[in-house]
């Protein structure tokens, strides 16, 4: 235990010493993050390459322990450190990708490609997911799952890095959870690689907590998320239990949940998945009037609760692991409900009320109607298909003027007040669709049905009608 305490303290001291040096160098080089009054509200330019200081503190602490003359320790320190340094190529790749984004800016696909490359290197170094639910993962599936896991963890920490001290603090809780789990499983090699990261992050938080004088940047958030993913993979290997990766997933629940919400939110809004917005969990809390410090502390508490769930589930899953997972999911669901995401509320109501099924059904019927139109051999045949389709979808009146001819199915008795949609086809030619405003027509039909007819008539029947007229 002494060596674990020493390596953590060394990393802490190195981070306290190196972080100001990295900050000053970044200021001189102009590597700063400037406020923009939309998503970045810090008062002035802040250096954004703090991940370099964290990485240096970690490496120096591990290197010192490697050469230190420890005696009578219960495990092979040089062997464990050497095994950890097998991860160095992958960690260097992810650090350089983040640093390049901090310095020059990368496109999302470039960052993703670099993350995949780093994940492949980590898998080749032995940091893969080989066991799930107590069963070995097949050889072809293991690398795929590993890459998805490591890329997901890297981006999760990156996305949550939106206010001072949040990503670093979340990293502390997740790493501490893996460290305690390693001790519970007597996995001293896992404990040795997690201990210096705890110290490095705590030392960095001295300068990163609000008001921050340096940011992690992508170089830090991507690296920390990547290392946490690797530690989670090691954790799953050491804990050959029924639920395997469940405990690491719970430990990283806060950033992973925020990532899942961001993807779901942008999908429902039809926005690019990698676009930036102000819909993250910390933004929601800031919009409720909390200060950045209180938001960070509140989310620290959530991470601490997730860590407790994770450790309890890991220690007692044979007896009540399933109950722990259920309780955790319920707590997460309640928390998300209080954040006020309108997208998920609307989607949920659509599903529960059957509206979603109705939309799918309407879309299928519209597609079938579009196919039916192609079977018409003449204008009269097509007109009959249009009238039948209009009646099926709830339109009360149809009038078509095309090629000098007029077709009309408007009722003549007890004329109601119709809302009308006019589809212009050519000069003097049109299609009118009318419906009773009291009728319940699916909004998808209101928009799509006229579009289908416009596309079909312009593409096929308008030229035919011109030939008939001439």
Image (cartoon, rainbow, N blue to C red):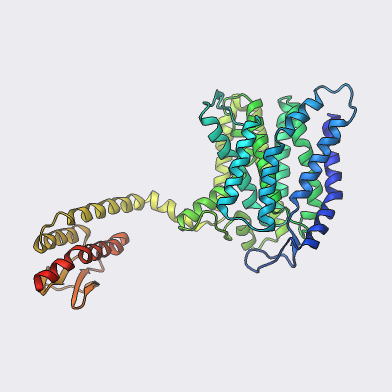
Lateral position of residue 363 relative to residue 303, left or right: left
Q: Position of residue 106 (x, y in %)?
A: 61, 55
For residue 298, say whether it is visible.
Answer: no
Q: Is residue 212 above or below residue 357?
A: below
User: What residue is drawn where x is 15% and y is 70%?
Assistant: 400
Q: In the picture, which quadrant includes the C terminus? A: bottom left
Q: Nearer the viewer, residue 200 or 359?
A: 200
Residue 362 pos. (x, y %): 28, 54
In this picture, residue 73 sits left or right of residue 446: right
Number of callouts in the render?
Answer: 0
Q: Position of residue 310 (x, y in %)?
A: 64, 35
**Residue 451 appears in the rendering:** yes
As drawn, which residue projects farthest toward the bottom?
428
Locate residue 40: give its quadrant. Answer: bottom right
| Residue 348 to residue 9: above or below | below
Vertical placement of 260 versus 325: above or below? below
Q: Quadrant of the N terminus?
A: top right
Side (left or right) of 450 relative to 146: left
Rendering coords of residue 111 (x, y %): 60, 50
Q: Residue at position x 61%, y 39% from top?
A: 119
Which residue is painted at 81% across and 27% down in the image? 78
| Foreground residue among 304 and 14 | 14
Quadrant in the picture for residue 163:
bottom right
Out of 308 and 400, give the one closest to the viewer: 400
């Amino acid at each position: 235990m002494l060596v674990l305490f020493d390596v953590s303290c060394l990393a802490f001291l190195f981070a306290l010493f190196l972080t100001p040096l990295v900050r000053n160098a970044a200021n001189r080089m102009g590597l700063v993050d400037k406020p923009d009054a939309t998503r970045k509200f810090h008062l002035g330019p802040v250096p954004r390459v703090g991940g370099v200081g964290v990485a240096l503190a970690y490496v120096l602490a591990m290197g010192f322990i490697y050469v230190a003359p420890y005696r009578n320790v219960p495990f092979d320190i040089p062997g464990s450190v050497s095994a950890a340094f097998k991860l160095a190529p992958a960690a260097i790749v992810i650090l350089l990708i983040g640093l390049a984004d901090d310095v020059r800016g990368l496109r999302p696909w470039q960052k993703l490609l670099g993350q995949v490359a780093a994940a492949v290197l980590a898998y080749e170094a032995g940091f893969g997911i080989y066991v799930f639910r107590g069963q070995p993962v097949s050889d072809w599936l293991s690398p795929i799952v590993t890459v998805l896991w490591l890329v997901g963890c890297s981006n999760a920490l990156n996305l949550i890095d939106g206010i001072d001290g949040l990503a670093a603090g979340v990293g502390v809780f997740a790493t501490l959870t893996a460290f305690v789990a390693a001790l519970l499983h007597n996995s001293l090699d896992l404990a040795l690689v997690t201990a210096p990261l705890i110290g490095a992050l705590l030392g960095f938080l001295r300068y990163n907590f609000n008001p921050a004088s340096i940011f992690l940047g992508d170089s830090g958030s991507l690296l920390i998320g990547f290392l946490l993913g690797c530690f989670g993979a090691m954790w799953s290997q050491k804990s050959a239990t029924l639920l395997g990766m469940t405990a690491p997933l719970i430990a990283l629940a806060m950033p992973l949940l925020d990532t899942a919400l961001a993807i779901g939110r942008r999908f429902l809004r039809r926005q690019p998945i990698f676009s930036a917005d102000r819909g993250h969990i910390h933004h929601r809390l800031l919009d409720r009037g909390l200060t950045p410090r209180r938001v960070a502390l509140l989310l620290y508490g959530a991470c601490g609760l997730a860590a407790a769930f994770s450790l309890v589930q890991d220690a007692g899953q044979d007896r009540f692991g399933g109950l722990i997972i259920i309780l955790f999911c319920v707590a997460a669901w309640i928390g998300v409900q209080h954040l006020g995401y309108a997208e998920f509320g609307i989607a949920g109501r659509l599903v529960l009320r059957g509206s979603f099924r109705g939309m799918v059904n309407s879309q299928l019927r519209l597609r079938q109607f579009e196919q039916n139109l192609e079977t018409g051999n003449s204008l009269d045949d097509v007109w009959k298909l249009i009238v039948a389709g209009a009646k099926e979808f709830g339109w009360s009146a149809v009038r078509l003027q095309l090629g000098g001819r007029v077709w009309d199915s408007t009722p003549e008795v007890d004329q109601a007040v119709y809302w009308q949609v006019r589809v212009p086809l050519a000069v003097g030619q049109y299609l009118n669709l009318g419906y009773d405003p009291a009728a319940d027509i699916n909004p998808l039909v209101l928009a799509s049905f006229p579009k289908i007819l416009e596309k079909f008539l312009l593409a096929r029947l308008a030229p035919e009608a011109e030939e008939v007229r001439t």
